[in-house]
Structures are given as C-alpha cells and as structure tokens.
Amino acid sequence: MKKTCFLFSFFLSFFSAFAQNSSTNSGGQVVTAQPTIMVIPFTKEGEDMRTVLEADPVKRIVITKVKEAFDKRGFTTYDFVSKLKAAKEQNLLTSTNQSDIKSQLVTFAGADIYVEVDVNPKKDGIYNGIDLILTGNETSTGNALSNKVGNSGTFQTDDYGVLATKAIDKISVEFLETMQAKFTDMVENGRDILINFSFAQGSTVNGETEIASAGLPFSDVIDEWISKNAYKNNYHLQGTVGSSIIYDRVRIPLKDQATKQNYSANKFALEIFKYLKSIGLSPSKDIKGNTIFITIK
C-alpha cells in the first residue's frame, strides 16, 4: 500500500518542463504542473467516435469508471462527452476520417495525455465479464506511453460498473508505472520531432548557398540554430537526402518555459519560420504529427 501511495503521489508531481530560446532554454529551471488526462473510447473500423458511446451503454459505463479511477488518484481529467459536445457546437470536427477526428478532439480538449479504452464484454451463461485494454498516449505527438490488458474475471452479475472496477483495479498500478517511466523521461529530456528542410523548384537557395548575414552556407547556419534551440542541445542530423536536409531527431520540451503552456511541434516550426525570415529567406512550413516540413522558396 505504501508503495502504491508513493507511486501516485510522485506521478502527480513529475510533470515539469524547461525553455531554450525563452521557450526551449532549459536554463536549469523546472516548472512543475499536474498532467491532465482525457479518457476516450477506442473505435474500430466503421465506428464513429462522435456516436459510439450513444449506441453502447457498456462502453459508457466503463469509460466513466476509468475516468473515476484517475479522479480518485488526484488527476485532473476532462470529460470526453462534454468536450465532444463542445467541439460539435463549434463545428470543429469537420473531417470524415476517424483518425483526424480523434486528433482534432484531443487537441481541442487540451489534455496532456489521452487514454484510449477498448472494452470487450463477454458472457458465459449466467456469468458476465469484460476484457479491458488501456493505451495512454502523449497528446502532442500521439506517442504511446503505456499499454495494459486486464480482465474482470467472470461473475454472476450484470453490473458492468462492478466488472469495470475489478478490471481497472488489476492493471492500474502497472499501467501508471509504465506511463510514469516514459513520461518522466520526456519531462527530463524533451520529446523527439523530425525536421525536413527542402528547397522549392526554381529556388535560388540550396544547402551550400552562403547566407550573407552569417558568412556561412545555409546547411551550417541552420545547424547552428538547431544546436542552440534543440532542448538541452539534443539533436541528430541524418544528413542530406536528395535536395533535403533531414534532422531525424530534434528534442523539444513539453512545456514552454516562458508561458507555462504546452509546447508543440507547431510552435517550434514557427520559431524556425521567423528565424529564416530574419535572415532574408522565404520559407513555408507544414506540420504533420511530430514532423515539420520547411520549404525554402
């Protein structure tokens, strides 16, 4: 029991981040904040996240019980149904692609972590049970932090709230231990993004073009900037592929040190964009998940 209490107390306090250009400078300073969580249903092919709970009372019960389990341990949680309703009212969920809808919803909710719950009820005569799969993901990148499978066992009851609680109790500690280890690493060392610099057809700039203000080729100028602005100077240059300069690992922090808000790949892309404009270039940017595409016109 003492070990479990310590685990939950520690997990509530580990969510910290740093800044570097004011936003990414680690500076030796730690900003601590409690992670926020939204529990969402896992959707199978053909299921619509916007309506899945309306058609399945068992999933509604289990989603509620998982959320309650986090609430009881002191986490700040966002209600999936409330956030979904708000997103619908604001016409934010415009895609027909379920992956896009999930991404739009979790981004709109603003939770640091979303936990997908896959529920499989089972019945054997007068006995009922459920199999439960929990998957914890970091919202900004979608990277999995923890996966765990549990089951309630079978009982002579049709109270799925009781069955859900039994299944959750069996896996919650291990689920959080795994999530803690991975998330703590990201808190301390940042998370990885990929950056691809390319040159538009007809561009007068390439990797070897000397940037007058720096007196260095573009490839060296951008490498110096990445070195200074990657979180704790942690990055890796994959090299030049065709006309592209690819960084297959650049670390950015979880939190903006200056604003205390979530720090995303989009914000880092904006910093790159502003820097390239400041040295006289004409860039465009595109962000897909945790990959930034910068094109020099």
Image (cartoon, rainbow, N blue to C red):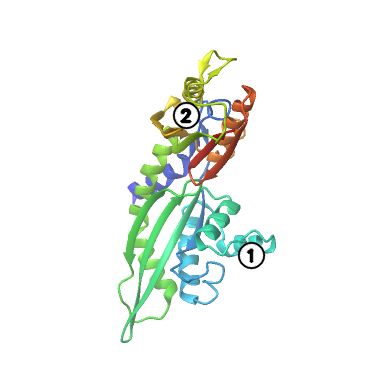
Relative height, residue 42 to residue 31 (above, below): below
Farthest residue toward the front?
202
State whether residue 13 is above or below residue 103.
above
Location of residue 209 in the rendering, given as x and y in whole percent from the top left corner: 52, 21
User: How far across and how far down the image is residue 29, in percent?
Assistant: 51, 26
Image position, residue 211 (x, y; %): 56, 18
Q: Is residue 262 visible?
A: no
Circle 1 packing at 10 Å, graded few (<14), some (14-19), many (20+), is few
Q: Is residue 288 above or below residue 119?
A: above
Q: Where residue 243 appears, x then y in whole percent?
A: 45, 33
Q: Residue at x 47, y 36 (%)?
A: 196
Q: CA distance from mark 2 to mark 1?
A: 37 Å
The answer to whether residue 39 is left or right of residue 180 is right
Q: Is residue 176 visible?
A: yes
Residue beneath disc 1: 85
- Amino acid residing under circle 1: Lys
Specify the quadrant that holds the C terminus: top right
Q: Say which element carries label 1.
A: helix
Q: Nearer the viewer, residue 96 or 114?
A: 96
Residue under circle 2?
231
Which badge, 2 or 1, is on the more N-terminal residue?
Answer: 1
Viewer-proximal residue among 260 and 243: 243
Q: Amino acid at mark 2?
A: Tyr
